Amino acid sequence: MQKIPCSVAIQVLPQVEDSKVIPIVDRVIAHIKSLGLPTTVGPFETTVEGDFDTLMNMVRECQEICISAGAPHVLSYVKIHYAPEIGCWSMDEKTSKHSDANAKV
């Protein structure tokens, strides 16, 4: 069982007209992926694993990307699991038993 120090799930909601939301969110996701950290993109949020400082910087950068893309303000929902001494379960440990390949009928 691989333990990680921190995982963050983030959902950004740039407050712009509907047609501009997805392109801005796509820029945020591209930035998150560019960090090279374990990442899972879901329909409502993106989950990332790594060290605490890197992930906190990522959260700040996600806000800045939305603003620089033209959003006058952004709402973000962030979940943080931080356990530097004992570690957190990885995304795979939390979800692999639910994947289609492992599903039991």
Image (cartoon, helix red, strand yellow):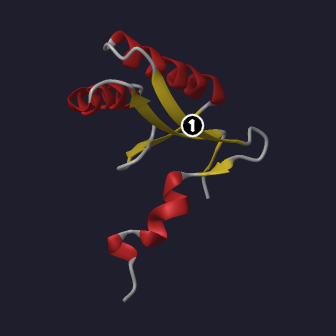
Give the residue drawn at x 40%, y 14%. 72
* Residue at the extreme bottom of the image, as rendered: 105
Q: Residue furthest right?
A: 85
Q: Is residue 31 above or below residue 96?
A: above
Question: What residue sits 51% from the left and 23% below the top?
Answer: 58
Looking at the image, residue 73 sits to the left or right of residue 52; the answer is left
Which residue is identified by label 1?
78
User: For the residue marked with disc 1, what is the amino acid?
Assistant: Val
Q: Is residue 36 visible?
A: no
Percent position (x, y) of residue 26?
28, 31
| Along the line of sight, the residue nearer the viewer: 29 or 23 | 23
> Which residue is drawn at the image coordinates 49% and 63% (left, top)?
95
**Residue plotted at (29% across, 30% down):** 21
In the image, residue 97 lies at what x, y percent? 47, 71
Quarter placement of the N terminus: bottom right
Image location (x, y in percent) of residue 80: 63, 40
Q: Is residue 93 left or right of residue 27?
A: right
Dividing the picture into quadrants, the one containing residue 67 is top left
Looking at this rendering, what residue extends furthest in the top direction?
Answer: 68
105 lies above or below 34: below
Number of on-image labels: 1
